[in-house]
């Protein structure tokens, strides 16, 4: 009996001790959490007007070129993009959401980006079909520094910057007639970027908007632009071709291309349902990816792999390898395809540029 009473007393004492320890530990966790969250200032919010009035594609080119160099050296942590498909229903969609990000070694920030595209029902409401934000994070403390409401503006800038890098390293100085298939926002940044590489003459083709694009770019850049009636005509005139369409179907054919050699810089394919360049053109080309592990899944390379006309061993180089001089760019009258799906390295680069510039405002 005395033994039973003693055991009960020990159990009660242990329970009270455990409860006291749990309560103490919980209070400590709450206090620590409160201290941690209280110690971080809220991120600064930069609205669309602030972003668009203070950043240009020229701001991004140098940093994006450096990011490609670092990427080729294995100095960038770039996870595979996340894709969320929003199927059309009575309450949602259709649309797509991409989440990308990256960290360039030895830089003070990293970036995570959320980009929403192809929400075409927005047009009926007087809204654009795409939107998005960049979150720039302190790489020392892990604290979000800034949220940039860029609505794909910064994405388009870094895509244009990649187009400039591709033209600089994968074309020759004599190639100065530049064609644009698709004449939307990305095409404008590609034109601005191309004009920073060398003097150009522009050729434009699109189902809609080519006249307005050519007039605007000619006035802004001070270069001549010609509007043509077909993609075939554009291909016959162009030394360099930028393609930036929704990617629902291929936009050119091998027989249309300039026999003196052409550099095709394709940026319309960034998910498995898209394709701008036919597999036979890819197979006949010196193919250069921005990131092979990505283009094989969501870029132009994917369709060539699926058709069985290429393997990953046929990839000549990643763009950063050409930038670094590890692989050659143009050699003679060849077809070069540069497949730009957009990497987290570019997002990290433009994120750093945006923070450096806009945080001073």
Image (cartoon, rainbow, N blue to C red):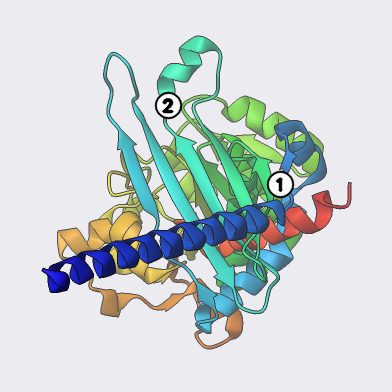
Q: Report x, y in % for residue 193.
A: 69, 54
Quarter of the figure with residue 166: bottom right
Q: Which residue extends farthest bottom?
A: 326
Distance CA(mark 2)–CA(mark 1): 30 Å
Taking the image as shown, residue 192 lies to the left or right of residue 87, namely right
Ranked by sequence position, the earlier of labels 2 and 1 is 1
Q: What secondary structure is marked by label 2?
A: loop
Q: What secondary structure is marked by label 1?
A: loop
Question: Vertical placement of 353 versus 323: above or below?
Answer: above
Q: Which residue is mark 2?
A: 119
Question: Vertical placement of 328 versus 348: above or below?
Answer: below
Q: Nearer the viewer, residue 266 or 66?
A: 66
Q: Which residue is mark 1?
A: 42
Question: Vertical placement of 155 versus 332: above or below?
Answer: above
Query: Residue visible at 37% across and 42% down?
Result: 251
Query: Residue visible at 39% across and 78% down?
Result: 316
Q: Report x, y in % for residue 344.
A: 51, 61
Quarter of the figure with residue 280: bottom left
Q: Nearer the viewer, mark 2 or mark 1?
A: 1
Q: Quadrant of the N terminus?
A: bottom left
- Residue 44 in sight from this viewpoint: yes
Taking the image as shown, residue 156 lies to the left or right of residue 327, namely right
């Amino acid at each position: 009996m005395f033994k039973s009473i003693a055991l009960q007393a020990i159990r009660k004492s242990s329970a009270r001790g455990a409860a006291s320890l749990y309560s103490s530990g919980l209070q400590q966790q709450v206090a620590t959490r409160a201290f941690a969250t209280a110690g971080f200032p809220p991120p600064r919010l930069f609205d669309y007007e602030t972003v668009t009035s203070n950043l240009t594609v020229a701001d991004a080119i140098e940093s994006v070129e450096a990011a490609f160099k670092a990427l080729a050296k294995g100095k960038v942590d770039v996870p595979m993009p996340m894709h969320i498909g929003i199927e059309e229903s009575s309450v949602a969609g259709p649309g797509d959401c991409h989440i990308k990000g990256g960290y360039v070694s030895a830089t003070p920030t990293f970036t995570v980006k959320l980009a929403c595209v192809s929400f075409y029902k927005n047009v009926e409401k007087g809204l654009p079909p795409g939107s998005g934000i960049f979150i720039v994070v302190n790489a020392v403390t892990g604290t979000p520094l800034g949220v940039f409401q860029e609505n794909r503006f910064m994405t388009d800038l870094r895509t244009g910057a990649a187009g400039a890098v591709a033209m600089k390293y994968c074309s020759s100085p004599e190639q100065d007639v530049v064609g644009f298939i698709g004449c939307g926002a990305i095409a404008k940044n590609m034109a601005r970027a191309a004009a920073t590489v060398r003097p150009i003459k522009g050729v434009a083709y699109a189902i809609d908007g080519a006249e307005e694009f050519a007039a605007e770019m000619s006035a802004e850049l001070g270069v001549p632009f010609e509007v043509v009636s077909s993609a075939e005509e554009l291909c016959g005139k162009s030394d360099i071709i930028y393609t930036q369409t929704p990617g629902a179907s291929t936009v050119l054919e091998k027989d249309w291309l300039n026999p003196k050699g052409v550099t095709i810089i394709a940026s319309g394919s960034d998910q498995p349902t898209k394709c701008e360049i036919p597999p036979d053109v890819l197979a006949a080309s010196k193919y250069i990816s921005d990131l092979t592990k990505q283009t094989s899944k969501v870029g132009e390379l994917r369709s060539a792999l699926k058709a069985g006309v290429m393997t990953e061993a046929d990839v000549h180089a990643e763009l950063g390898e050409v930038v670094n001089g590890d692989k050659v760019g143009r050699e003679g009258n060849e077809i070069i395809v540069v497949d730009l799906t957009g990497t987290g390295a570019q997002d990290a680069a433009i994120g750093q540029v945006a923070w450096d510039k806009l945080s001073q405002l």
